[in-house]
Image (cartoon, rainbow, N blue to C red):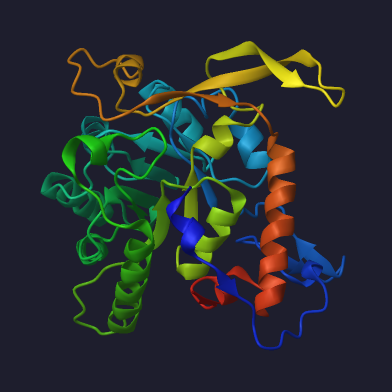
Amino acid sequence: MSEYSRIKIIPAVISDIEHRSECLPYYDAFWSTDADAWCLAGAHLPIFTAPMASIVNDKNYLDFDRNSINTIIPRTVSYERRLEIAKQLIWIAVGLDEFRKFIDEHDSLEDEYRICVDVANGHMKKLIDMCTEAKNKFGENLILMAGNIANPNTYLEYAKAGIDYIRLGIGTGSVCATTDLTGIHFDPIELILSCRNIKFYVENNIRNFDCIYKSVPKIVADGGIDSISDIIKALAIGADYVMCGKLFAACEEACGETRVIHVPIKSESGTVVFKDKTYRKHYGMSTERAQKEMGNTKIKLSEGKEKWIEINNTLPEFEKQFVVAISSTMSYCGKRTLEEFIGNVSYR
């Protein structure tokens, strides 16, 4: 059972929304006067893929993008290939050494790059200093995501660095063993709520001329998401985006190793029949396997796990299911847009 199972969203006392089709759970959609409807070309759901080798590679990333899901290319794809893909305004993940290389190799950026600095410990001073340097050098042409963090006060340091997106959560993922090994953890719900409050503080202060904050990082809840309902709850309490791993590993379009298993099932008559089910090997990016796939010659202690996940969905079906579910939630709460919904509903 996920951490989010204890959250229950309370509907508005009165909602003036008559049908869930009035609700828009996408970012960057715009109203078309010609069609008298919302245009979703280029729009995306408030969801990121985790940058994991059992989900995304350089062959299937457009499948996610076509289904309105923000995609992050993992570090198992070659650095050169990731830079090629980045020119299509697709997010790419880089390690610290690769990020150093990117900063040193570019005097300026003519195109926009969306880079996720993908490290286990988002509290490192080295990471924050490097992000500060990169944002000062490249400005608005570098959209930067960093993390993961498990201390809400680190949000302030990311805001000082000018980082645009902050990944929240350490040890909460289904294939992450960090908390089991190290004891490092922060309740994911409390982490979102605390960072949401700090975000309001930064927003209110950043208008000041002498403000020390350079950005208002968007909150990306990462880890511990078991269902579409969990995604909606994370958004409801204040996350701007939710990052998913296991849910996408269970989709047909994901990449990675699969196998077919003959599963015994009892029929209505009581006889046992065997049904073929397909599973995918889902694994954390600090596992020995992922470290080797990233080309590491010195293998560190693994803080990741490997699991076989049943493939039981497709990306078009996922998008449809999510849109229907969150639109219904928004209609209950009387919220027509994500901006109205996120962090602005009652719950218990």
For residue 55, above or below residue 329? above
What residue sits 38% from the left and 36% below the top?
93
* Furthest residue toward bottom: 14
What residue sits 47% from the left and 57% below the top?
4
x and y percentages locating residue 339 in the rendered image: 56, 73
Query: What count of labels does the image hold?
Result: 0
Q: Is residue 68 visible?
A: yes
* In this rendering, position of residue 346 left or right of residue 64: left
* In this rendering, position of residue 207 left or right of residue 55: left
What residue sits 27% from the left and 68% below the top?
214
For residue 232, above or below residue 226? below
Q: Quadrant of residue 305?
A: top left
* Furthest residue toward front: 270
* In this rendering, position of residue 196 left or right of residue 339: left
x and y percentages locating residue 346 in the rendered image: 53, 79
x and y percentages locating residue 337 in the rendered image: 64, 72
Q: Quadrant of residue 303?
A: top left
Give whichever of 94, 106 is nearer the camera: 94
Give whichever of 348, 122 is nearer the camera: 348
For residue 315, above or below residue 128? above
Q: Is residue 240 visible?
A: no
What residue sits 54% from the left and 68% below the top?
8
Q: Quadrant of residue 312?
A: top right
* Furthest residue toward left: 125
